[in-house]
Amino acid sequence: MDPSPFRYNREQISRSYAYNHGGYRENYVHFGVFLDNRPVGSFQLKRMDPEKKQCEFGIILQDDSVKNKGIGTEAIRAGMKIARDQYGMETIIGDTMGRNRRMMHVFEKLGFSLTEMVPGAFELPDGSREDRYVYTRTLKEDD
Ligand SMILES: CC(C)(COP(=O)(O)OP(=O)(O)OC[C@H]1O[C@@H](n2cnc3c(N)ncnc32)[C@H](O)[C@@H]1OP(=O)(O)O)[C@@H](O)C(=O)NCCC(=O)NCCS
């Protein structure tokens, strides 16, 4: 997870999309997050493992103007359904830095459990380190 504030950059997002869908990373899929037909973020299912039926996800919204409005929660919920229904995943994993209280709250709201904490796993631009919190969720039939 990148601790710097995110600024939407069309070229960078397009490059990432092309990379993920260009055949380089078959076990990744990349989705746009939309509000009133306007792209406001990016959601990825990552490292989908068909044997373990397990994947990870990443999400980033455009900027503060679209945060805290329930969009991230809804996008992750939709992503969980896609992971289960389209890719046969049974477990989804996400991670965040200890300082990201909002994401930790979203994990808890969506029924994820804290399964691992790795002290000092992230290095910040100022050289300091942040703990990595890993959350796991079993994908159920009625999600
Ligand atoms: C993290 C992120 C995906 C969440 O999406 P969002 O649309 O902003 O979040 P939502 O509005 O769905 O939910 C936010 C919840 O956190 C709560 N919250 C906000 N700030 C909080 C804080 N400092 N501490 C605890 N809870 C907080 C909100 O009240 C809300 O909870 P509620 O619905 O129970 O009231 C989004 O903010 C984002 O893209 N952040 C930057 C990138 C990032 O951190 N990605 C995640 C790491 S992989």
Image (spheres, grey):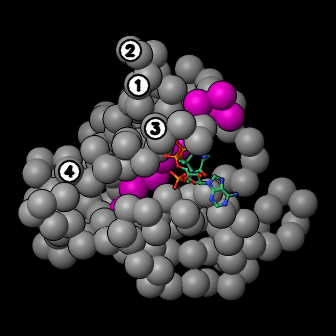
- Sort mark 4 into few (<14), some (14-19) or many (20+) by Cα contacts within 10 Å: some
Can residue 119 be seen? yes
Q: Residue 71 shows which numbered tag?
A: 3
Q: Are marks 4 and 2 in contact (CB under 8 Å)?
A: no
- Of marks 1 and 3, which one's residue comes earlier in the chain? 1
Label 2 – label 1 distance at C-alpha = 5 Å
Q: Amino acid at mark 2?
A: Asn
Looking at the image, tell me whether mark 3 or mark 4 is earlier in sequence order: 3
Q: Is residue 131 above or below residue 101?
A: below
Is 128 above or below relative to 120? above
Dividing the image into 4 quarters, which one contains the C terminus? bottom left
Report whether the residue tagged 4 is closer than 8 Å to ligand 1: no
- Frontmost of labels 3 and 4 is 3
Lower position in the chain sequence, tag 4 or tag 2: 2
> Which residue is the site of mark 1?
34
Residue at mark 2:
37
For the magenta stretch, what is the residue range? 56-66
Instruction: Locate residue 51: give its quadrant.
Output: bottom left
Mark 2 and mark 1 residues within 8 Å of each other at the beta carbon: yes
Q: Under tag 2, what secondary structure?
A: loop
Q: Relative to 16, is 135 above or below?
A: below
Does the beta carbon of the residue at mark 3 sit less than 8 Å from ligand 1?
Answer: yes
Q: Amino acid at mark 3?
A: Ile
Q: CA distance from mark 1 to mark 4?
A: 17 Å
Q: Is residue 68 left or right of residue 73?
A: right
Is residue 63 inside the magenta stretch? yes
Q: Which labelled disc corresponds to residue 81?
A: 4
Q: Quadrant of residue 121?
A: bottom right
